[in-house]
Amino acid sequence: MTRLTNFFKRKSKLETSQENSSKIEKKRKKIEDEQDTNSFKDLEDKYLHESWSCMLKSEIEKPYFKRLKHFLEEELKRGKTIFPPKHLIYSWSNYCSFDQIKIVIIGQDPYHNHDQAMGLCFSVPMGTILPPSLKNIFKELKSEYSDFVIPNHGCLYGWAKQGVLLLNATLTVEAHKAYSHAKKGWEEFTDKIITCISNNRQNVVFMLWGGHAQQKEKLIKSDCHCILKSAHPSPLSASRGFLGNNHFIKANEYLNQKGIKEIDWSFLPNRENL
């Protein structure tokens, strides 16, 4: 008969040592992870999709980009909060690989309030109130497609997964300070992205909304791609040319003419893991 005390044998020194080592290792890993969340050094290695990293490798090694990374590090040391969270800065690359691009929508800089920026221009996480510009984007879609149902969220992963690159010209921002990271180096980096697309892809639709986005037109080969321009969807300008621009229909018509599968603009699942 098994004695009850057999179930409560004292652990050997070896078992105790192994457990302590495991705890120390877990604690060390936790500290490293916490430190890592405060570092931008390995951002591209960890979060930039491989289809983009091979295209942008030489750009990442340039002095201006190193200065940009140093600026971000210094901002963190000063206790600044930066949006989007580090692991989401390159979301645009992971939801839309380079060889998948059909449409490029160019924004200016990320949303600067908590729980808004997610690495895709104009998009916000599930459960976040729709920003005014995104409301106007959905309003325009509804006017173009009568059967379009305006979703109860603003997460645009569904578009990105179909080949819509949602790219801000500036990829980070200080909390509650719009345009605070402008002219720090991101614009040069994202200009390179646009140039890479223009030079290495064919028949891409570029939607340039507002004067800031339209400055990028000079980077695009107009004989190889479709360029659509209008006012910005912001409430300050939407009524002066954005609403009624028919860009979503025009984009799909162009893709169809080129034998490319159209975008289903209504594909906006109410979950983030597609």
Image (cartoon, helix red, strand yellow):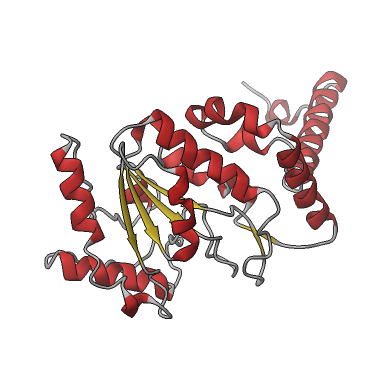
Q: From the image, which quarter does the N terminus lie in?
A: top right
Q: How many numbered tags mark residues here?
A: 0
The residue located at (58%, 37%) in the rendering is 47
Side (left or right) of 88 relative to 229: right
Most foreground residue, 75 or 228? 228
Vertical position of residue 2 compared to residue 181: above or below? above
Residue 29 horizontal/vertical position (percent): 76, 35
Q: Quadrant of residue 176?
A: bottom right
The residue located at (29%, 54%) in the rendering is 269
Q: Say whether residue 122 is visible.
A: yes
Vertical position of residue 67 compared to residue 83: above or below? above
Vertical position of residue 61 compared to residue 226: above or below? above
Q: From the image, which quarter does the C terminus lie in?
A: top left
Q: Say whether residue 33 is visible.
A: no
Side (left or right) of 162 relative to 219: left
Residue 141 horizontal/vertical position (percent): 23, 65
Vertical position of residue 199 compared to residue 31: above or below? above
The residue located at (73%, 46%) in the rendering is 68
The residue located at (85%, 24%) in the rendering is 17
Most foreground residue, 157 or 138? 138
Residue 187 horizontal/vertical position (percent): 60, 50
Q: Quadrant of residue 20?
A: top right
